[in-house]
Image (spheres, helix red, strand yellow):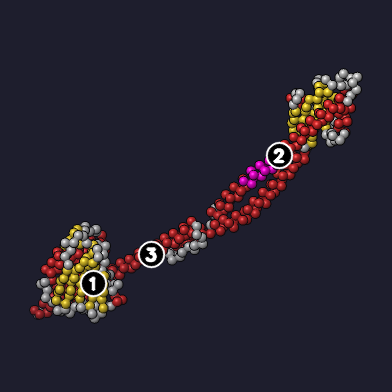
């Protein structure tokens, strides 16, 4: 069952209950008020009739010590037909219960007389067929004779009005429920409109349409829910896009890895086959062995760097306080034996939070790439300086440079700007990818500034501790 239908049914059930109880209370309240008014009027009329009877009894000739039955009949008859008692039913009964006078239609029993005492007025509401009456009883003291005066007042109209009130209210309730159902149908549809939009968006996203967004049509809690849903959908779309990019990157990685393996292996197999299948002179044998050695070293470097990338991605580093001087001393010792470039090291004293071996790997790879991008004898600058709350390392070369469109891709595994030049220098396109992975573990990243033909400046920023 739809939520809008549930809302409609619950509302109409509540509305029916409220209208039913309130209608019953209202009609019954009007009825009881009218009946109470009729009862009070009947009691007042009974008092008037009693007073009139006692007054009439005083006018009976004095020769009677006790009011005779004939006089009682005559007085009662006059009261019933007179102006004061017109339209009323009367009955006069003596102390022994003998009826001295009774209207023709007076059909009430005498059970009320038992409860009637002198100085009191008693009443009850009785029904005779389809008619209802107020039956009153009071004591009349006339010429030392105790009599009982009973009256019947027809109040059938009051009961008929109650029945008519219930009938009218039932019809009105049914009409209000029908109108309320129509109105609540539109209201519930309007209130649940955001839910329908969310349901539609959920189905379309489940079908793979991740760019679809739910329409926001209100500013209440459902509107806020729609906004949260759309933000969740955007995050989901972004994550799915990222996963697709990662899958594509892995496929590209596997393809590039297979291609990079194929080239040196082809050379190694070809020259090895030449060496074993024919007799070569000393110079050709040396060249063949040198090709095999060179390509083997390239495979070794590629496998070591690839393994470092895999290990780095899976592991967590333990950061310690590393003096900057230690890192620069390591670089000087490693590259001082190489005279192919003009290396210049400048730095400020300081301490960084890092894993020393991994940061050394980053700096060595940056220097190695700078060498590959530069002509022999070119100047390569390695700089270290404090910057705000961190310490910045920068490697600057004056070589080929990197085109703007290539700069965003050079940290991808096996990606090389100049493949022929990189392979000639045993490059495999894994150095900067490894650097990016290591720096990510240090909450840092590579910052690249490069202009083709003018060289490149590649650096990164590390968190510092206390200054030395």
Residue 437 appearing in the image = no
Q: Is mark 1 on a helix, strand or loop?
A: strand
Work out whether residue 375 or residue 38 is closer to the camera in this orientation and state it.
38
Residue identified by numbered label 2: 33
Q: In this view, does 367 lie above or below 170?
A: below
Q: Quadrant of residue 182?
A: bottom right
Q: Is residue 432 above or below residue 316?
A: below
Q: Comparing marks 2 and 1, which lies closer to the viewer? A: 2
Q: What element carries label 3?
A: helix
Work out whether residue 54 or residue 206 is closer to the camera in this orientation and state it.
54
Q: Residue 458 carries which label?
A: 1
Graded by Cα atoms within 10 Å as few (under 14), some (14 to 19) or many (20 or more), the crowding at tag 3 reads some
Graded by Cα atoms within 10 Å as few (under 14), some (14 to 19) or many (20 or more), the crowding at tag 1 reads some
Magenta region includes residue 383: no
Q: Comparing marks 3 and 2, which lies closer to the viewer? A: 2
Work out whether residue 388 or residue 127 is closer to the camera in this orientation and state it.
388
Q: Which residue is drawn at 28% across and 78% down?
A: 403
Residue identified by numbered label 3: 238
Q: Quadrant of residue 401?
A: bottom left
Q: Give the range drawn in magenta.
A: 18-35
Magenta region includes residue 24: yes
């Amino acid at each position: 069952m739809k939520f809008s239908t549930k809302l409609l049914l619950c509302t109409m059930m509540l509305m029916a209950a409220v209208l039913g109880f309130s209608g019953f209370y209202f009609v019954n309240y009007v009825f009881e008020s009218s009946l109470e008014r009729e009862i009070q009027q009947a009691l007042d009329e009974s008092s008037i009739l009693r007073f009139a009877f006692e007054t009439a009894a005083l006018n009976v000739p004095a020769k009677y010590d006790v009011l005779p039955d004939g006089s009682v009949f005559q007085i009662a008859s006059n009261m019933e037909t007179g102006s004061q008692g017109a339209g009323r039913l009367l009955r006069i009964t003596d102390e022994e219960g003998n009826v001295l006078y009774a209207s023709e239609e007076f059909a009430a029993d005498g059970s009320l007389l038992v409860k009637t005492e002198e100085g009191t007025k008693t009443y009850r509401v009785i029904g005779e067929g389809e008619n209802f009456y107020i039956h009153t009883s009071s004591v009349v003291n006339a010429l030392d004779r105790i009599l009982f005066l009973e009256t019947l007042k027809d109040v059938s109209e009051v009961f008929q009005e109650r029945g008519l009130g219930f009938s009218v209210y039932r019809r009105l309730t049914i009409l209000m429920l029908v109108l309320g159902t129509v109105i609540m149908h539109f209201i519930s549809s309007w209130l649940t409109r955001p839910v329908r939009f969310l349901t539609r968006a959920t189905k379309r996203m489940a079908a793979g349409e991740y760019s679809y967004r739910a329409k926001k049509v209100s500013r209440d809690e459902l509107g806020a829910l729609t906004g949260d849903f759309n933000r969740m959908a955007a995050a989901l779309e972004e994550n799915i896009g990222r996963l697709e990019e990662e899958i594509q990157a892995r496929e590209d990685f596997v393809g590039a890895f297979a291609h990079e393996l194929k080239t040196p292996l082809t050379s190694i197999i070809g020259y090895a086959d030449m060496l074993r299948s024919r007799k070569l002179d000393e110079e050709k044998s040396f060249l063949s062995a040198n090709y095999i050695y060179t390509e083997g070293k390239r495979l070794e470097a590629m496998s070591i760097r690839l393994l470092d990338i895999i290990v780095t991605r899976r592991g967590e580093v333990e950061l310690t306080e590393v003096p900057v001087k230690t890192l620069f001393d390591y670089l000087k010792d490693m590259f001082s034996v190489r005279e192919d470039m003009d290396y210049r090291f400048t730095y400020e004293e300081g301490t960084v939070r890092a894993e020393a071996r991994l940061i050394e790997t980053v700096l060595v790879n940056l220097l190695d790439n700078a060498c590959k991008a530069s002509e022999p004898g070119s100047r390569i600058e390695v700089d270290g300086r404090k910057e705000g709350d961190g310490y910045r390392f920068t490697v600057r070369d004056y070589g080929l440079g990197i085109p703007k469109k290539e700069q965003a891709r050079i940290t991808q595994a096996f990606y090389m700007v100049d493949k022929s030049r990189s392979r000639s220098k045993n490059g495999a396109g894994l150095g900067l990818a490894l650097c990016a992975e290591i720096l990510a573990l240090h909450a840092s990243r590579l910052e690249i500034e490069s202009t083709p033909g003018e060289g490149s400046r590649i650096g990164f920023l590390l968190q510092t501790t206390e200054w030395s």
